[in-house]
Amino acid sequence: MIKLAPFESCTGCTACMNSCSHNAIVMAEDAEGFIFPHINGNKCVECGLCMRVCPVLNTPIITNVTKPNVFAVWSLKDRTVSSSGGAFSAFARNVLEADGVVFGATLGTNLLCYHREIHMIEELEVLRGSKYVQSELRDTFFKVKAYLKEGKNVLFTGTPCQVDGLYRYLRRNYDNLLTLDLVCHGVPSNTLFHSYLLKLEDLKKVKISMFEFRRRNGWGFASAISDRGKLEPIYDIENLYMYAFDKAVLFRKSCYACPYARLPRVGDCSIADFWGIGRHGKSFKHNVLKGVSLVLANNAKGINAVQNLQESFVEERTLDEALAENYNIIHPSPLHPMRDKIIAAFLDSSRSLKSINKEFELIDNSLKERVKEYASRYHIYDLLKNIYNKYKAL
């Protein structure tokens, strides 16, 4: 009898669905909007392949090193149009210039987060920027495999569970595949994100056509929306989704026991923001205000990929420094005791953002957070951050 991953452990990686040649598995939303596999008993022949490729039902076999090489990276061409240092774009440029294919998450015109492929450097824009929501993979694994079998170089970027799901689906190593796993806090659902957008539209009396979870003009800038025009930063109650995200209250249940938040990591490289660089040991005598990417090279392929980055700043750093302010490299986010109730409130069409915050007090009103917000709002963040970094580096 076919028995897929338990509800609490399933990551929604789609390895089972993509592996089923009988199209007997579909991904469908639960009450919180997270996708799970469902088996059509009339189509299933009980071959068991879906169970054999499931990362949850089979112990991860990760051969990467437990002490990865650590690098501070930024792309000279992409840093000022990226959420962090633009490391993803630097890796992607190398693959695209070799006539390869890049897969990553994008927000579509309907603001639905999903994975798509690009073939040209001019298309990089659609994959740049942070997306704090679970990306729908759909038939991405099937497409990746087809390109790999053609001999194309492929770059796949995703959460660690998505990377492992791809590996399980492929069932063999490909020299022409490079994977980047994201240092992930956890993932909310597309449905919850869209419920938030509807509440935000009601609050601001606008129709949102564009959303940036983090602005791409430097570290520390607020989320922004567009009503078919210029991006406008949002603060306080308008940005309640990101306050809730930071408190880890909106995530898929499996995220709170993530088996990938550890060393060794699952991807050839892992990428994140290099929070705290220069404040823990060796100084960093460069301006960090436009963002610095953290890259962990987890195996020989990853090291080679970093060494071949073009038009990029690359400096080797220490693992201790990387771990100091990047909790989720080796720890899952802790389960918030009010998680279920807060998600239900966001999904309740009768609840406003103000009423949700009044009940659950999600907005951080600490002095530090207030200073950061007003500095961003009144365009003095760079100055204050520079002073703070110099003080901490003393």
Image: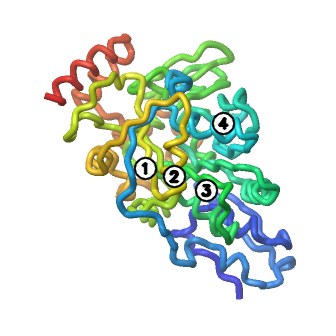
Q: CA distance from mark 2 to mark 3?
A: 31 Å
Label 1: few (<14), some or many (≥20) within 10 Å? many
Single out the mark in the foreground, 3 or 4: 4
- Is there a contact, CB below 8 Å, between mark 1 and mark 2? yes
Along the polypeptide, which appears first: circle 2 or circle 3? 3
- SS for dot 2: helix
The residue tagged 4 is 107
Label 3: few (<14), some or many (≥20) within 10 Å? many
Q: Is residue 117 left or right of residue 71?
A: right
Q: Which label is found at residue 296?
A: 1
Q: Which label is found at residue 211?
A: none
The residue tagged 2 is 302
Name the residue: 65% across, 48% down: 155
Kind of residue sitting beneath label 4? Leu
Where does residue 383 sit, x and y in percent of width and height? Answer: 29, 14
Q: CA distance from mark 4 to mark 2?
A: 27 Å
